[in-house]
Amino acid sequence: MATPALPIIAPMLTLDQALGFLLAALLITATPGPDNLMVLGMGMSRGRRQGIAFGLGCAIGCLSHTLLAVVGVSALVAASPTAFTLLKWAGGGYLIWLGAQALRHAGGAQGAGMGSAAARAAVVQPLRTLFAKGLFANAINPKVVLFFLSFLPQFVEPARGAVGLQLGALGMIFTLQAALLFGALGWFAGSVGAWLNRRPRAGLWLDRAAGTVFIGLGLRMVTAR
């Protein structure tokens, strides 16, 4: 007997298909990785709202990879060493730039007294800017491109037809659960950061730690084979 389709969330997926994918997606998203570390660093150094905004940007960036997987561009990038190398360098360079910005702000705020609310407010970026940075950082990550290309098709049932719609539905499920987990991580990291910022000079070291994490991830992406 065929498993009934899930009509509201994804009309092209069966209930077993959607739940199986959701469980795998939750486990993968919760596993420590570059996105988790970036959200954690941003939340601890900038605050709850900033961490949540950056985390949501990272999650929504998954939609671009879903679209690429659907239209087959990911396969083209994976098959072209030159295209993959260019994308890798672009992504790594962007992360290094984000880290350098965090370190620069930390150094600039030190003279003004990092413990003061006014000094920290001066370096806080608009939430939409942080959202856009998270979106862009995820969208140009070549490893995420390859991950979606290899992960989503494993849960597609060709016999049901409309493979593109199934891929799109799976990508939406992945994006929604990532938004929830990254949002929660940003909130938690912001709470820890707020507690630490009440201690002398803690804010300065949080910015330095966040900058170091971003630069380290960028260098790792650039040098990875």
Image: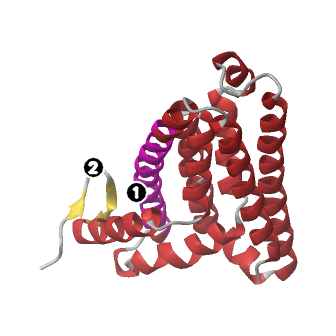
> If you read the primary sequence from the N terminus, does the residue marked by circle 1 or circle 2 appear first?
2
Closer to us: 132 or 181: 181
Residue 205 is tagged as none
Q: Quadrant of the N terminus?
A: bottom left
Hey, what amino acid is under mark 1? Answer: Ile
Using residue 177 as the reference point, say whether residue 57 is left or right of it.
right
Q: Which residue is mark 1?
A: 173
Using residue 61 as the reference point, say whether residue 220 is left or right of it.
right
- Label 1 crowding class (10 Å Cα cut-off): few <14, some 14-19, many 20+? some
Using residue 222 as the reference point, say whether residue 8 is left or right of it.
left
Magenta stretch: give its range.
164-191
Q: Where is residue 100? Give x, y as percent.
A: 83, 48
Is residue 141 depicted above or below 58 in this figure? below
Name the residue rendered at 54%, 57% in the picture: 36
**Picture quarter containing residue 149?**
bottom right
Q: Where is residue 155? Give x, y as percent.
A: 40, 76
- What secondary structure is marked by label 2? loop
Q: Where is residue 147? Give x, y as percent.
A: 58, 73
Is residue 59 depicted above or below 106 in this figure? below
Name the residue rendered at 40%, 73% in the picture: 161
Task: Please say whether residue 72 is visible from this viewpoint.
Answer: no
Q: Which residue is mark 2?
A: 8
The reply to whether the C-beta atoms of the residues labelled 1 and 2 are less than 8 Å apart is no
Name the residue rendered at 80%, 74% in the picture: 84
Closer to us: 161 or 19: 19
Name the residue rendered at 23%, 65% in the picture: 15
Work out how far the residue at label 1 is from the one at label 2, CA to CA, in angstroms.
Answer: 12 Å
**Render colour scheme:** secondary structure
Q: Residue furthest left?
A: 1
